[in-house]
Amino acid sequence: MAATTHTVSNQVPPLTGYDVFATDRALFEAVRRHTSPGLLAEVRGELGELGRAAGSAQVQEWGAQANANPPVLRSHDRYGHRIDEVEFHPAWHRLLGHAVGAGLTDAWGRPGGHVRRAAGFLVWTQAEAGHGCPLSMTHAAVPALRTDPELAAAWEPLLTSPVYERGLRPAGQKAGALLGMGMTEKQGGTDVRANTTRAEPLAAAGEYLLTGHKWFCSAPMSDGFLVLAQAPGGLTCFLLPRVLPDGTRNPFAIQRLKDKLGNRSNASAEVEFDGTWARRVGEEGRGVRTIIEMVAATRLDCVVGSAALMRQAVAQAIHHCTYRRAFGGVLIEKPLMRNVLADLALEAEAATVLAMRLAAAYDDGSESELAFLRIAVPAAKYWVTKRCTPLVGEALECLGGNGYVEESGMPRLLREAPLNSIWEGAGNVQALDVLRALQREPMALNAFLQEVGRARGADHRLDGAIRGMLTELADLDGIEARARRLAERMALVLQGSLLVRWAPPEVADAFCASRLGGDRGAGFGTLPHTLDLASVVERARPVAH
């Protein structure tokens, strides 16, 4: 075909070669707000370096390669010996190595560690979300291991190390290690108390042999796993290494890898234990209590990870509409498209601000802040992860047919979007955990009300939403059936309170009008036309300001 018939015009340049951190105003401001002045320059420096890498063409290509080349199970070697290894594309190892080197498994021992790690996780996983799974579990395992000082002394330096060492060797011979988690079984799923895996004690104190299975075991090439099994004293938490200290392989049969909707770069396996050695973590019969802090930390990562997906989707949509021309002008100047983009930007900023506020509560560590987390984390996890999928779908539509093809990267974001709502307990589990915190921990509700109350009087729509929430809380009739409604309302009120205090007036006004005042339709792009939508969109543009 003659070249003159195929002139390329009106195509959008790729969003590449930019600083993912510095061009995200909501995140940049949250880091400044929640970081001590003496630490701010250091944190900004490390996040800027990570942001420039995440926005580079090279790292974006790694993300595409890792997604296009899913892991492969190698159950046996060429001679028929069982090896149970999973082979990953080199891009997976490059992404994981860079993330570990940037401190994304090290939050618990550094000053401001949770804020800087959450911000880094939000930035880096925009390049590729699948490898965030082992990062999250390794980071979250630390508080569970701290219930046993001996185990913590041996493992915590490896889990927080900036060194990524691939391959199966005794953890003690490595400069850094990763941990996975195996809680659910085929017959019980989220109901882990229905687990049937048996743990038989050995003569040595704290040592057991496990027999059973795990239906979902993510990142099966990790150096160890926290698992739940039925010991003589009840459901108990165990640390199960893949390789024993003498170099022999711990029995760990990978039956198959899951063929998943998204999260394609990450391996999720069905595994079998048959006389598998493990070390008890915490007391017998208190497995759920031992592992609950790990669950809470990974739930926060679900919020952060969803905020990352939202931000990347919004950045791509606004970037596309900044350059794409239609009907006599660029799309971003069209009133209806501007309304859609502003609505998406509001949702993404609210998710980011909430995620970073939760991370800051971990850094504070006071009794009131920890009480606040017990109710705010499940509420945030419920709502933010629920909003991710429709937002990404709408952002994809902003690119039209160009967004529906794999090369745009938008289908990968859309397939990834539902994951965080399912991981660590789906929507009903989160809503019921909000109820549980309300019923069992009065300090949690008091801390939550104090937090949202800091914005009282600043916006009449927020004040009205707080009153409505209190009415919901006072009515216990049919409370379980209303749990989702209550969790949603609490999350929205909390987001509104944070935005009223910290976001620009045009953002807070638009959020309160649409999310709390009810002045919008059921879909995105139905904001009141009288709002300052141009400023909301401009704030979310992925360009340096």
Image (spheres, helix red, strand yellow):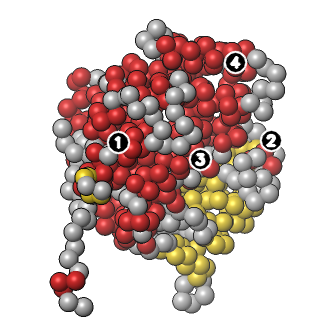
Query: How would you rate the neighbour count of disc 4 (Cα within 10 Å): few for under 14, some for 14-19, many for 20 or more?
Result: some
Q: Which residue is mark 4?
A: 473
* Occupied quadrant, residue 467: top right
- Residue 531 point in image, percent of width and height: 37, 28
* Occupied quadrant, residue 397: bottom left
User: Mark 1 near mark 2, Cβ–Cβ under 8 Å?
Assistant: no
Please indicate, yes or no, whether residue 356 appears anywhere in the rendered image. Answer: no
Tell me the distance, in whole angstroms, between the alpha carbons under discs 1 and 2: 64 Å
User: Mark 1 near mark 3, Cβ–Cβ under 8 Å?
Assistant: no
Tell me the distance, in whole angstroms, between the alpha carbons under discs 4 and 3: 24 Å
Tell me the distance, in whole angstroms, between the alpha carbons under discs 2 and 4: 37 Å
Q: Tell me the residue at 30%/51% (across/down).
A: 331
Q: Tell me the residue at 73%/21% (across/down).
A: 439
Counting residues from the start of the chain, the first of labels 3 and 2 encountered is 2
Residue extending farthest front: 328
- Give, as a three-letter code, the residue at label 1: Pro
Q: Which residue is mark 3?
A: 421
Res. 335 mark: 1
Query: How would you rate the neighbour count of disc 1 (Cα within 10 Å): few for under 14, some for 14-19, many for 20 or more?
Result: some
Please indicate, yes or no, whether residue 2 appears anywhere in the rendered image. Answer: yes
Q: Quadrant of the C terminus?
A: top left
> Which one is in front in this view, the residue at disc 1 or the one at disc 3?
1
| Helix, strand or loop at mark 3 | helix
Q: Tell me the residue at 57%/59% (across/down).
A: 218
- Give, as a three-letter code, the residue at label 4: Leu
Counting residues from the start of the chain, the first of labels 1 and 2 encountered is 2
